[in-house]
Image: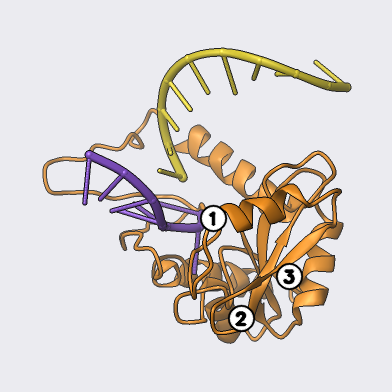
Chain colours: A orange, B purple, C yellow
Amino acid sequence: MVTVSAPYVAGYLAFREAPFLVEAAQRLQEREPGLRPQVLLVDGNGVLHHRGFGVACHLGVLTGLPCIGVAKNLLQVDGLAKDEQHKGQIRDLQMGGDVFPLRGTSGRVLGMALRSYNKSTKPIYVSVGHRTCLESAVRLVQSCCRYRIPEPIRQADIRSREYIRKHLSSPLGGTSPGPGRKEEAEPKH
DNA sequence: GCGACAG
DNA sequence: ATCTTGTCGC
């Protein structure tokens, strides 16, 4: 369990969550030295970011492990927008595995919109975090999508919420936002 | 008033 | 992220 105090500010997600992700990675290394992740799927963006350095990049540099950014919503940076052109490209995605590049005004490809499984309507946004190319990142992500969200991230989400519901719902858990105070305590993403 | 806004 | 309302498919 962790206690997060830093607020969520769009564009600065890493400053709020990276410390706990690094901690989790270190704990795994201590308790299971034999298990070395070959790659980490991160709930957030990699280079698809205001300053080209999202939480997946932070975690990668801090751990030295390859990282892939997987966002559920498009971060509208470098000219990228959820305009008709974008919506049209989404409609054109035919089956699971279909993608289209996210090219910013700068001309740079910041990531790929991916139809993660056959029945999906809304794509997920994959971007390079650290030590991987976009093509490999998309292929790996798609390979572990039974549902829209890659199973590793989906399970982390489901299990963390279950843990919260079970441990801090009735005892001392309920959020008690007194005047001028706002805080959370959890291992979410 | 309206759109943006990773999680 | 969270919440609500409603629909559809297995």
Q: CA distance from mark 1 to mark 3?
A: 46 Å
In terms of sequence position, does the residue under pointer 1 or pointer 2 come before the other?
2
In terms of sequence position, does the residue under pointer 1 or pointer 3 come before the other?
3
Q: Chain of mark 1?
A: A
Residue A165, position in %: x, y?
50, 33
Query: Do badges 3 and 2 share one subunit?
Result: yes
Q: CA distance from mark 3 to mark 2?
A: 19 Å
In terms of sequence position, does the residue under pointer 3 or pointer 2 come before the other?
3
Q: CA distance from mark 1 to mark 2?
A: 31 Å
Mark 1: give few (<14), some (14-19) or many (20+) Cα within 10 Å. Answer: few
With respect to residue A132, does A70 lie above or below?
Answer: above
Label for residue A168?
none
Q: Chain of mark 2?
A: A
Label for residue A60?
2
Residue A46, position in %: x, y?
59, 74
Q: Which residue shows up at 54% across the image and 40% down it?
A: A161
Q: Which residue is mark 1?
A: A83
Q: Which residue shows up at 49% across the image and 75% down it?
A: A78
Q: Residue furthest left?
A: A179
